[in-house]
Image (cartoon, rainbow, N blue to C red):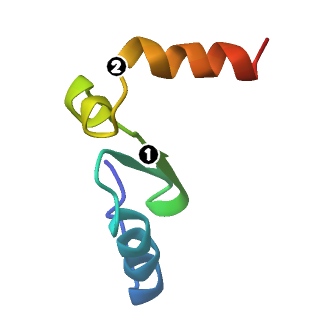
Amino acid sequence: MAKPVVLDQEWLDRIASQVNGLEYGSVLITIHDGRVVQIDRTERKRFDAASARQQGQTPSQGSDKLKALHG
């Protein structure tokens, strides 16, 4: 039978701090023997063609700049 997970206020605050401000992404909570042992945060940045046009670039112009930076 699985042990019940016990979360004190400190762990709840840690989890909340990882979730706050996250627009796209995930928070992974790892539990061993009914105890939280690790919190992983993966954040994604999403870009679309509309945002590139607002900046006065086509999507291909942005990639040309990247090529110039990396050779």
Say which residue appears at 33% left-offset and 50% top-offset: 2
Amino acid residing under circle 1: Glu
Amino acid residing under circle 2: Thr
**CA separation, marks 2 and 1?**
25 Å
Residue 23, placed above or below residue 26: below
On residue 56, the disc is: none
Residue 51, placed above or below residue 35: above
Residue 42, placed above or below residue 3: above
Q: Position of residue 57 (x, y in %)?
A: 37, 27
Please identify the residue farthest to the left as the structure is shown: 50
Question: Between 23 and 15, which is closer to the camera in this rendering?
Answer: 23
What is the quadrant of the C terminus in the image? top right
Q: Quadrant of residue 50?
A: top left
> Which is nearer the N-term, disc 2 or disc 1?
1
Element assignment for label 1: strand
Look at mark 2 in the image and give the residue it sits on: 58
Q: Position of residue 18 (x, y in %)?
A: 43, 65
Please identify the residue farthest to the front as the structure is shown: 56
Q: Quadrant of residue 19?
A: bottom left
Question: Between 31 and 1, which is closer to the camera in this rendering?
Answer: 31
On residue 43, the disc is: 1
Please identify the residue farthest to the bottom as the structure is shown: 9
Q: Position of residue 65 (x, y in %)?
A: 60, 21
